[in-house]
Amino acid sequence: MDLFDFGQGGSMPALGLGTWKADPGVVGDAVREAIRIGYRHFDCAPIYGNQAEIGQALAAAINDGEVQRRDLWITSKLWNSDHARADTLPALERTLSDLRLEYLDLFLIHWPVALKAGVSFPRSGADYLSEAQAPLNQTWAGMEQLVTRGLCRNIGVSNFGRSRIEKLLDMATIRPVVNQIECHPYLAQNDLLDWCRQQDIVLTAYSPLGSADRADMLKKPDEPKLMEDTTVIQVAEKHGLSAAQVLIAWALTRGTSVIPKSSDPRRLRQNFAAKEAGLSAADLASIDRLDRGYRYVDGAFWTGDGSPHTLENLWT
């Protein structure tokens, strides 16, 4: 499997298993099965509500000799209510406790959105913190101390646009190694991908299959269905692949990391096998033409009345 080498920070497998929307009572078995199949990269977050069960599965797999900790790459994220410098350490300690780990391989700022302590999701503008109240340089300083303490090996960001990363690079002592963003043929993110390559920042693609299983409240009634796209289906039929395999192979071929989610053993195996799928230059070109700048996770839930965020500035 392709790896992204971060030097002393270790090597991240390009293909991982996402755990957003993986239901409690199911996600643990999915993680155990994924480890048996060969997955070594697992993407987690406290806001997903399933880290404790994932931690049980990781501990069981290690204790049963199915995998060694040093062979795993575990990512988690700092939630919006923990952006104060003093809150980053307790937040990571809770995650490590849930995941039953002594360290993370990668810890990301989940969103460039700061909320008051204890607020999981905002109910009004009063629940937000402004940039002045929660400056990025202080959040990042908190993240850097976690590396210094040996509690995580690498740090990065998620849902950050270029201008925010540029500000971060100007202030950082430890550079971000990853930006995790929504990315798929309908949202190719070509400009951001090219720029991040220049900065030696790896892009990890979430919702690579179009996130059709996300909550109805996050969907639009007329949104396009990526897995049913005619071009994707034609390429899949040409090579005897599933639509998901085509989308995963496209992401890997572009040089991004990709974290499709599934709890079904058959699909887990299919998705893992996508790394061996051979798409031609013509196949890739036809998929590239699908880009329409369409976000399934558009961030509108951060733009309610009184919020300091708008759809225009959220992704800058």
Image: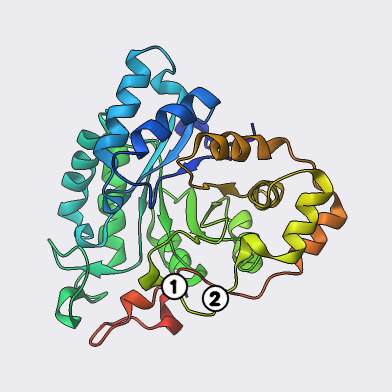
Residue 223 circle label: 2
Residue at image point 87% right, 57% down: 282
Q: Disc 2 residue type? A: Glu
Image point 23% across, 43% down: which residue? Answer: 92
Does the residue at mark 1 contact the one at mark 2 (Cβ under 8 Å)? yes
Q: Where residue 90 appears, x then y in whole percent?
A: 16, 45
Residue 271 image position (x, y, % from top left): 60, 40
Is residue 182 shown left or right of residue 44? right
Callout 1 amino acid: Lys
Separation of marks 1 and 2 at Cα, in angstroms: 7 Å
Q: Position of residue 236 (x, y in %)?
A: 76, 51
State the residue position of label 1: 219
Q: In the image, is 233 to the left or to the right of 197?
A: right
What residue occupies the far top of the structure in this picture?
65
Q: Position of residue 66 (x, y in %)?
A: 43, 16
Residue 47's place in the image compared with 2, above or below, is: below
> Looking at the image, is 188 positioned above or below residue 197?
below
Q: If the image is split into quadrants, where does the N terminus sit? A: top right
- Look at the picture and state if 77 lies above or below 39: below
> What residue sits 38% from the left and 52% below the top?
21
